[in-house]
Image (cartoon, helix red, strand yellow):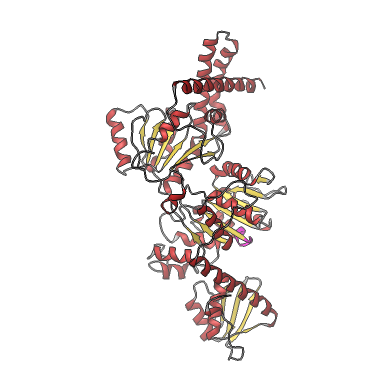
Amino acid sequence: MNYPSYLRDGDPDAYTYGTLSYNRRRKCWEIKGEPCVTELAKRLFPGCDGKGRGVARFTAHRRVIGDLNWLMLRYPLTVREGDRDKWEEALSEAREYAARREAARLAPETAETPAAFRAELMDFQKRGLAFMLANRRCLLADEMGLGKTVQGLSFLAATQAYPALICAPPHLITNWRREIERFLGPDVRVHVLRGLTPKPLPEGEIYLTHYLLLRGWKEALPKMGFRTVLFDEMQELRHSGTEKYSAASLVSSAAENVVGLSGTPIYNHGGEIWNVINILDFHFLGDWESFSREWCYGYGSNIVAKPDLLGDYLKREGLMLRRVKSDVLAELPPKRRLVIEIDSDDKVYRELMKSAFAPLSQYRAEENPARRAILADAISQLERQATGVAKAPWVCAFVRALLEGGEKVLLMAHHHAVMDIYKEELKPYKPKFITGRETERQKEAAYSAFMEGKSNLLCLSLRAASGLNLQRATCVVFGELDWSPAVHSQAEDRAHRIGQEDSLLCYYLVSPRGSDRAMQDALGLKISQFVGLMGDETPSPEDQMFIESQAREHITNLVERLLEEESL
């Protein structure tokens, strides 16, 4: 094996400066020796601690073992009798790790799509899978839209390291459940943790929770034997000192594999990455004092002096893999559609649907087909608005994540009541609006503000943005749906114009409750299809008539469903 010289064996006959033993309570290697050794260790190695003279402790990590062995080449130590086998095992793992890291640096690895994974990975995603398999405690920091969820699930398919815990923001739990079923199959048992009070859970392969619940399950989760922990949107853990952070640290330390997914692991200050990495690999960057002293502008500072240098170090050591769209643009189609299921507020939906009782009664009693069609349209509009309003907070949470990741977003909706919620919820991002309620001057000002970079969020009515060239956008988000595929294609094409050099991501955010199911069927959209079934060409008159007849059929079915629900 070709490993670095600092991992070679020392001279067995050399003078020894102390002893090396494994502290099982602290899970670390402990030097007890002459002050010249222990004092030097604390000065040289970030994270090396030990109060008082003659004691120095090293985290039992493959990388740290290399540092410790290097120190022992200069200052030999006697390994305690009962710990010799454990030291040889640790040294062997450190050598294998170092050799693998060097091989990956010289020639990035790729992995085949796992047999248990029900899709084909793109080439760059195969490289991401290989990275995670080679570095079992790491951060996949790909830019949003490159399939971090897909790569994370392919890791589970490849390792079969169950049971696994997946922690995600609340608005993405439903989507994770759908993605697991799509990519890992219905035989993988999934359970969602509920409430802040721990309770016995049924057997399963994957357990889903969100960050707000971690504090309640803090003591229970580390005892549940998770082999893999996957943190989605791991920037949620960029601040230490909270019960959420403490719970994440505890469950992480008890797992074999810990993978973080985040397109934006750092928000305001580079020092936040220390908190994120500390969950993945405790004290990889040393303790906070040594990190802030050496990487930042001084004790306690969280402004990294040379962020590029820190990023390169994390990549080189196998802690982080980061690709942006420009890196893999040749592998991406010009336009991608991704359907994501989000939650909605059932209470809000039911309250708004009370206004549909009267027209439903009229529809039931009406015999004239033309009048029934008018009533069906009115009922459909009521349910569409109720659906849009009920899921609007979750749409806003999704859009916030995009904006914080640096995306330039077109947010599409239909109802003014929905737009008003967007305006309030997304106020800190200075959204601009073109909804049909604005004057020509206001419309032009909103357009200019977005195109000139004064705002990264433009909210548009689905049918009020014709003729606009908005190629600055990198994402189109549909917070509400329209019955017509052509309306969506035209909305997408506001951004997908000449001058758009990116791979445009079009997100369709749907909820399980309300009109979205029927409208998905009408549009030919399936959950999590990267390429939708909608046509991208202008429909012929015959096609348009067929689309309208299909929409009419779906509206009728929607009303019949509401009548059935009302009678239950």
Q: Is residue 439 left or right of residue 1?
A: left
Which segment is the magenta one?
250-256
- Looking at this view, is 189 or 191 the one in front? 189
Q: Quadrant of the C terminus?
A: top right
**Residue at position x 72%, y 47% from top?**
202
State whether residue 347 is above or below residue 75.
above
Q: Measured from the top left, where is residue 529 in percent x and y?
A: 54, 40
Let me know if residue 53 appears in the view.
no
Residue 432: image quadrant is top left
Let me know if residue 125 appears in the view.
yes
Q: Measured from the top left, where is residue 170 in percent x and y?
A: 55, 44
- Looking at this view, is 301 or 376 the one in front? 376
**Residue at position x 53%, y 74% from top?**
48
- Looking at this view, is 540 or 347 the one in front? 540
Numbered circles on residues, count: 0
State whether residue 320 is above or below residue 216.
below
Whether residue 23 is in magenta: the answer is no
State whether residue 306 is above or below residue 415.
below
Q: Measured from the top left, where is residue 525 in percent x and y?
A: 54, 34
